[in-house]
Image (cartoon, rainbow, N blue to C red):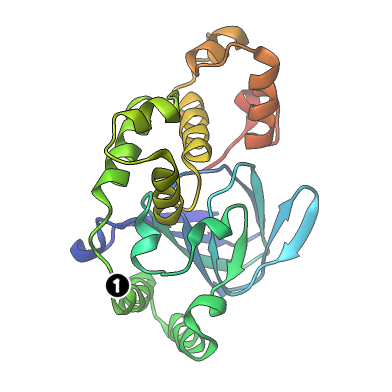
Amino acid sequence: MKMERHLPADILKPFVEHYLFIESEQGMENRVLPDTGMVMGFRYKGTISDEIAGIKNNLPAALITGLRKSVRLINYAGQAATLLVIFKPGGAATFFKEPLHELFGVSLALDALIGQQKLSEIEEQLAEANDNFQRIAVVERLLLSRLYDTNSDLLIQHAIQQIRLAKGAIRIKQLVSTLPVSHDSFEKKFRKQTGSSPKQFSSIVRLRHLIESHDSSANLTETALSAGYFDQAHFIKDFRIFTGQTPHEFFRSTIYW
């Protein structure tokens, strides 16, 4: 397996976290945990499938994936290669007018959003590109052509920052009480920009932080308490949905991204 990360052009940096190239010579399986940014993918070689709840599906050559609450297994056949656009939280809304919260837990063929003719041109250019820098240029031309609103909702960006600062352990009702907006209006704005509800987003932040900051010397109770869980059974249930494994299994053996 070969993975390369590249940063976007300056004009796209407020919306795109990075580009990720994944190439597989012999075939492999990737365990992909939920994260706070939507992902757009372009497969330019081979075959790639995913497995969710034990069901395998071949993936289209180009797709967009919404936020999700559960682990996803990606299977790369030998000689498969893909380019992923990893958006920042709320970044995808800059390029798509569609209600992105409807993509929560879903991967959608990209032709449903940008049209088959345009997509065919992109796929052809990616296949003919000589290197990854040329592939990035192809995708960036597409993104720049779709920029329609570069003014992010500052209130929602502030809320995202507060959720991150609290490491996901925050009461949404309390957060909204500090903002000049009604609860219903906040929920609607948040879903539109991030592709998830505030509660779902906070849950992803909380479990990602727990995993990334895990201390191998800590016991399970300490781990649960550090993430704001006071019910260990609830913690284990959420963790298993998130990773597909118990905490003991996951921290002992899992490689993920």
Residue drawn at 53 percent across, 39 percent down: 200
Q: Would you say residue 13 is visible in this rendering?
A: yes
Residue bearing the label numbered 1: 147
Residue drawn at 64 percent across, 13 percent down: 231
65 relative to 233, above or below: below
Residue drawn at 28 percent across, 52 percent down: 153
Under circle 1, the secondary element is loop
Q: Would you say residue 167 is visible in this rendering?
A: no
155 relative to 80, above or below: above
- Image coordinates of residue 151 in percent, x first then y, are 23, 60
The image quadrant of residue 1 is bottom right
Of residues 71 and 248, the one nearer the viewer is 71
The image quadrant of residue 173 is top left
- Image coordinates of residue 150 in percent, x first then y, are 24, 64
Of residues 67 and 198, the one nearer the viewer is 198
The three-letter amino acid code for the residue at tag 1 is Leu
Q: Is residue 219 left or right of residue 154?
A: right
Q: Residues within 10 Å of mark 1 (few under 14, many from 20)?
A: some
Of residues 30 and 57, the one nearer the viewer is 57
- Image coordinates of residue 46 in percent, x first then y, are 63, 72
Residue drawn at 65 percent across, 48 percent down: 72
